[in-house]
């Protein structure tokens, strides 16, 4: 083939590279790789599972470009006919490119999150292909069947093993992309196809011109696609922040790498809605504080009024100190802007990071802390959060199951003393959960959750079923049971099936409707009131008794209380306590009770704990007493121990 020789001072120096090669392609490739590394280091790329593959790809392309340049350069300097180094760098060049090709395959299957049974055969095929092509390349070179250079510098291309491997790998990648196309977003897939087509076009044009300079460059195209389509995460220019989506990835990535990442969450409660606009001076302050104190900190915008600052502790040796400074600066701004806030401080080593729940944990804590507080996430918070999640998932499962006798829902009961007879003939049903991992769960841990997630009505149905079962049993066994009350949440009355569900359960159990009572609390909400009134009137029409629960804890609008058809007013334990503290309170509670009794309501005192409580309440127009003095809540089956049996005649009457 062509060789040009020049002679200078008796030494033979070749003027051209073989293969029509020019270093421009490799130089551009190296430069672009460097730019990508700079971008990755300064922007906040998404560090997902594919990220390390992505970085390895850039490194392999860099190696290929350098090796390619060196093999060609070395060739021009050889004067003694020994081309071993050229062969070695050519081999490194090929291995690096084969590595890029197998890297594409790994990248695609990781990105698609293929199932194991699909992933494994592909990986085995790709690995065999990789080893086979590398070995074949070596054998062909050594045996002289492939690319060889003679001692005089003339060379022959021989069988192009590399091209065969290239075609095989590209086919494999295309096969995966087509066979499992549903596993990737269409747009991402199209982006990758685009880069492959352009790479192929460049290769064709180059080969038409007998060129080989841009081979490595074409390997770069899909990698540029990856950076843009998968890992890119533009900064918000106003705040200099990154989107929420990136945050969980970052937390998980740092947790996997065992890097301790400190996080600071700031919620400006007044701006906690999608339409809020942060005043520019507030954005400015946030941007400034987040940039000024920590090294390499990143700001994430979770929602309009919620930002999160994350800083690597390894880059901030005096992390705690800097944190204090940030809080100080925050306080100064707070004096100026006077906006309500909730700050939560934590770090990524909390094991919660692995499961993408860190943000959810922060949001949950946010719900439970007061405004203008700074909270540090503790191990206990994480434990509580895990319990919360567990209880929530169990509740969801109970609701999904729809079993009215789900064994995880326990009906407890507190017997109520009827003062006029001195006997227990009514009771209140109280719910508990009994879950595998946590054992008994009390209402304060799950009723608010069930209300928030819309599960409460399903739970009420279960409690009502259990109560009906028990009443049927007590009636059958001739016990004197007037009624048992079931707690109902005002929220569930919005459910269209509310009345029908309750009616069906009671009818199906065959007990008289007046043996069931429901307890409801006052609601402050105007809309709720109309709905409540409507539903309560219908329950009342069925013969169900209605209790007003927790009187004395709310704002107690007398007019509204009168508008609802209550039978019994339950005085909350706080009134029992108040009336024991001073004379005036005692008088007030006494006259309230007297007033209700005068209006034909029955008064029930809740939380009667002592003999003293009992005496006082009895003298205050009480009709019923309930509290630990008589019994703590007990399993509903034990209620019979409190109730007395009816005389035979009574039963017939
Ligand atoms: P509540 O309806 O006011 O129920 C009375 C609560 O006071 C019960 O707590 C009971 O155990 C407790 N208690 C009874 N006697 C005494 C006493 O002498 N001293 C003191 N300090 N406390 C006493 P529990 O069972 O933990 O229930 C708490 C709340 O959870 C209930 O308050 C009710 O609002 C809600 N809840 C319980 N079961 C249900 C249910 O099935 N459905 C709905 N929607 N809410 C329920
Ligand atoms: Ca109650
Ligand atoms: Ca109550």
Image (cartoon, helix red, strand yellow):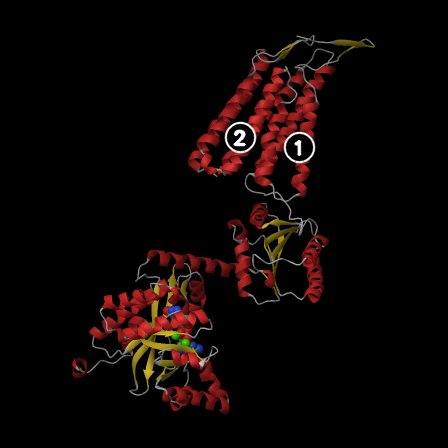
Residue 180: x and y in percent read 45, 34
Respond yes or no on whether mark 2 lies under 8 Å from ligand 1: no
Check if mark 2's residue and mark 1's residue have beta carbons within 8 Å.
no
The quadrant where ligand 1 appears is bottom left
- Is residue 646 something one can see in this rendering? yes
Q: Which of these two is toward me, 598 or 632? A: 598
| Residue 348: numbered disc | none
Q: Quadrant of residue 3?
A: top right
Specify few, some or many for label 2: CA neighbours under 10 Å numbering under 14, 14-19, or 20 or more: some
Residue 603: x and y in percent read 37, 84
Mark 2 vs mark 1, foreground winner is 2
| Residue under label 2 | 193
Secondary structure of the residue carrying tag 1 is helix
Instruction: Judge left or right: residue 12 versus residue 184.
Output: right
- Is residue 516 something one can see in this rendering? no
- Image vertical order of residue 618 relative to residue 150, above or below: below
| Residue 33: numbered disc | 1
Q: Quadrant of residue 83?
A: top right
Specify few, some or many for label 1: CA neighbours under 10 Å numbering under 14, 14-19, or 20 or more: many
Q: Which of these two is toward me, 632 or 521? A: 521
Residue 202: x and y in percent read 61, 23
Respond yes or no on whether mark 1 lies under 8 Å from ligand 1: no
- Residue at 23% over, 78% down: 479
Residue 355: x and y in percent read 51, 50
Secondary structure of the residue carrying tag 2 is helix
- Image vertical order of residue 475 relative to residue 67, above or below: below
- Residue at 69% over, 27% down: 28
The quadrant of the rendering that contains the N terminus is top right
Q: Earlier in the sequence, mark 2 or mark 1?
A: 1
């Amino acid at each position: 083939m062509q060789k040009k020789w020049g002679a200078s001072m008796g030494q033979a120096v070749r003027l051209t590279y073989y293969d029509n090669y020019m270093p421009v392609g490799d130089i551009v490739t190296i430069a672009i790789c460097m730019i990508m590394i700079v971008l990755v280091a300064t922007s906040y790329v998404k560090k997902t599972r594919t990220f390390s593959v992505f970085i390895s790809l850039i490194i392999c392309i860099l190696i290929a470009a350098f090796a390619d340049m060196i093999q060609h350069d070395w060739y021009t300097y050889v004067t003694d006919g020994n081309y071993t180094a050229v062969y070695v760098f050519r081999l490194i060049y090929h291995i690096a490119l084969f590595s890029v090709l197998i890297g594409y395959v790994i990248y695609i299957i990781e990105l698609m999150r293929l199932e194991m049974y699909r992933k494994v055969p592909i990986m085995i095929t790709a690995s065999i292909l990789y080893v086979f092509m590398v070995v074949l390349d070596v054998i062909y070179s050594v045996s002289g069947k492939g690319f060889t250079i003679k001692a005089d510098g003339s060379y022959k291309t021989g069988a192009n093993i590399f091209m065969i491997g290239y075609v095989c790998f590209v086919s494999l990648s295309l096969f995966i992309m087509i066979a499992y196309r549903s596993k990737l977003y269409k747009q991402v897939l199209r982006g990758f196809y685009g880069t492959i087509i352009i790479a192929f076009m460049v290769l064709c044009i180059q080969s038409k011109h007998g060129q080989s300079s841009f081979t490595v460059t074409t390997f770069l195209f899909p990698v540029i696609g990856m950076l843009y389509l998968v890992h890119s995460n533009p900064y918000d220019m106003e705040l200099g922040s990154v989107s929420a989506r990136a945050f969980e990835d970052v937390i998980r990535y740092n947790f996997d790498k065992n890097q301790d990442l400190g996080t600071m969450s700031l919620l400006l409660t007044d701006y906690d809605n999608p339409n809020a606009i942060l005043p520019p001076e507030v954005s400015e302050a946030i941007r400034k504080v987040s940039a000024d104190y920590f090294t390499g900190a990143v700001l994430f915008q979770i929602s309009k009024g919620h930002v999160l600052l994350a800083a690597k502790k390894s880059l901030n040796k005096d992390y705690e100190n800097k944190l204090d400074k940030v809080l100080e600066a925050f306080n100064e701004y707070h004096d100026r802007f006077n906006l309500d806030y909730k700050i939560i401080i934590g770090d990524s080593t909390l094991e919660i990071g692995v499961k993408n729940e860190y943000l959810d944990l922060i949001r949950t804590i946010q719900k439970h802390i007061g405004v203008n507080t700074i909270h540090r996430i503790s191990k206990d918070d994480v434990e509580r959060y895990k319990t919360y999640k567990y209880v929530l998932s169990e509740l969801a499962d109970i609701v999904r199951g729809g079993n009215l006798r789900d064994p995880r829902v326990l009906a407890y009961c507190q017997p109520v003393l009827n003062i006029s007879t001195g006997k227990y003939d009514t009771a209140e049903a109280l719910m508990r959960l009994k879950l595998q991992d946590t054992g008994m769960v009390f209402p304060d841990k799950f009723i608010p959750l069930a209300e928030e997630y819309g599960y409460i009505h399903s739970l009420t149905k279960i409690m009502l079923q259990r109560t009906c079962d028990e009443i049927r049993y007590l009636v059958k066994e001739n016990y004197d049971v007037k009624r048992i009350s079931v707690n109902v949440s005002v929220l569930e009355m919005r459910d269209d099936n509310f009345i029908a569900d309750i009616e069906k359960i009671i009818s199906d159990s065959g007990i008289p409707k007046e043996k069931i009572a429901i307890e409801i609390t006052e609601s402050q909400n105007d809309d709720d009131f109309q709905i409540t009134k409507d539903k309560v009137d219908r329950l009342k029409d069925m013969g169900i008794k209605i209790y007003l629960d927790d009187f004395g804890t709310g704002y107690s609008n007398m007019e509204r209380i009168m508008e609802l058809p209550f039978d019994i007013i339950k005085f909350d334990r706080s009134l029992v306590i108040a009336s024991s503290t001073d004379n005036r309170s005692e008088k007030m509670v006494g006259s309230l009770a007297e007033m209700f009794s005068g209006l034909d309501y029955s008064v029930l005192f809740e939380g009667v704990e002592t003999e003293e409580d009992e005496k006082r309440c009895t003298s205050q127009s009480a009709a019923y007493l309930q509290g630990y003095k008589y019994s703590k809540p007990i399993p509903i089956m034990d209620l019979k121990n409190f109730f007395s049996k009816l005389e035979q005649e009574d039963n017939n009457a």
